[in-house]
Amino acid sequence: MSQDFVALANEGVQALKPYEPGKPIEELERELGITDIIKLASNESPLGPSPKALRAAQEALLDLHRYPDGSGHRLKTALAKKLGVNSEQITLGNGSNDVLDLVARCWLKPGDELVFSQYAFAVYPIAALSCNAKPVVVPAKNYGHDLDAMLAAITDKTRIICIANPNNPTGTWLDANSLEAFLADVPSHILVVLDEAYFEYVEESDYPDGLAFLQQHPNVIVARTFSKMYGLSGLRVGYAISSPEIANVLNRVRHPFNCNSIALAAAEAALDDEEYVAENLRLNREGLVQVSQGLAELGLTVIPSVANFIAFDCGQEAAPVFNALLKEGVITRPLAGYQMPNHLRVSIGLPEENQRFLQALKKVLA
Ligand SMILES: *Cc1c(COP(=O)(O)O)cnc(C)c1O
């Protein structure tokens, strides 16, 4: 008799389903018989990788027979200098997803609670359930985090609260005063992860830099990534900034070589490529206006976004719209998995890509 290994898995793991990534562009092109598909589905940089990062990655290839620097010394030093923190405050991750998982594994015992908002990032429940802990989902307010409701959701089992600012997939954000007031009310033994994957895109004057909270609130962990603004999604590099004590705990559990040598080299070079970041920021600023105006002209309601994507209401079930857009060669992101069955999320692309998306959508909705 073969064993039922699903039934033997941790209870939390039994409640999970494997993440279903979108099909690769090449496979879709073959299936649909078209050749010029544009992907606006994963909030990637439309610019391609930074030339500086590419060059550094190529050089690093020559040392592939060596293990990477397990401490990520050079990248941490560069980050520390750029961010004005000590390198002992930085923990490197295989993407910032890895950082979230590390935090969960260090502090969640079975039965503990991890609190996050409805419509928040899909990785939070995975992190909780894989530790047999309980994901506590707090209803959102206007698609954004309801901080008062999140405070009210705290129990004596709560260990971690995750806040994405801005949030994915909604693009909503919290201002400095709201977040400061919230942090002042969170008991100091509860860790607050500020997930700032889209930090570099936000230009609102009252948008907070999570690092500013670290001094007053040593229970804060800021998570950032090279996947979005720095255009290195494929290499998987993210990092946490926290107190040195918290970083020390995270580094006990972190796999010693969780960032590979190419990723370390490319991230260090990308950090230095100010031209790339400035261009990406400009493209995004203009693209947000182009796409949100275009959607409004089609009579659609958008959720105002400060990140590099926009979620909008199709005014009908989104799945057929998503499929029709695919046939037009445009990949977007359906949000049914986030309990938003009528919404699609579209990443900001190059101006001509945004235009093609808007034209395709107009045709599809006609
Ligand atoms: C994209 C994203 C991340 C980054 O994930 P990586 O693992 O660094 O690629 C983290 N948080 C949110 C909310 C995101 O949307």
Image: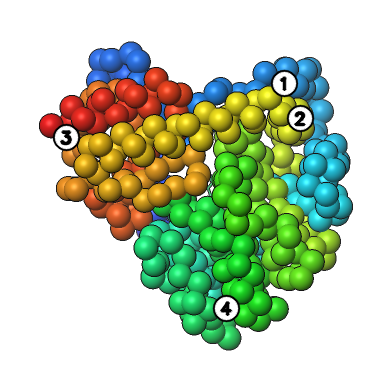
10 Å neighbourhood of mark 2: few (<14), some, or many (≥20)?
some
Distance from the alpha carbon under mark 2 to that under mark 4: 39 Å
Vertical arrangement, residue 71 with respect to residue 11, above or below: above
In the drawing, what numbered circle is on residue 224? none
Horizontal placement of 289 versus 324: left or right? right
Residue neighbourhood size for the residue with mark 3, other residues' Cα within 10 Å, grouped as few (<14), some (14–19), many (≥20): few
Is label 1 in contact with label 2 (beta carbons under 8 Å)?
yes
Between 321 and 185, the residue placed more toward the observer is: 185
2 or 4: tag closer to the N-terminus:
4
Instruction: Name which residue type carries label 1.
Output: Lys
Residue 101, visible in the rendered structure = no
Tag 1 residue? 52
Checking the image for residue 158, the label placed there is: 4
N-terminal-most mark, 1 or 2: 1
| Nearest to N terminus: mark 4 or mark 3 | 4
The structure's colour scheme is rainbow
Q: Which residue is mark 3?
A: 365
Q: Amino acid type of disc 2? A: Asp
154 to 108, vertically: above or below? below
Tell me the element at label 1.
helix
Secondary structure beneath label 3: helix
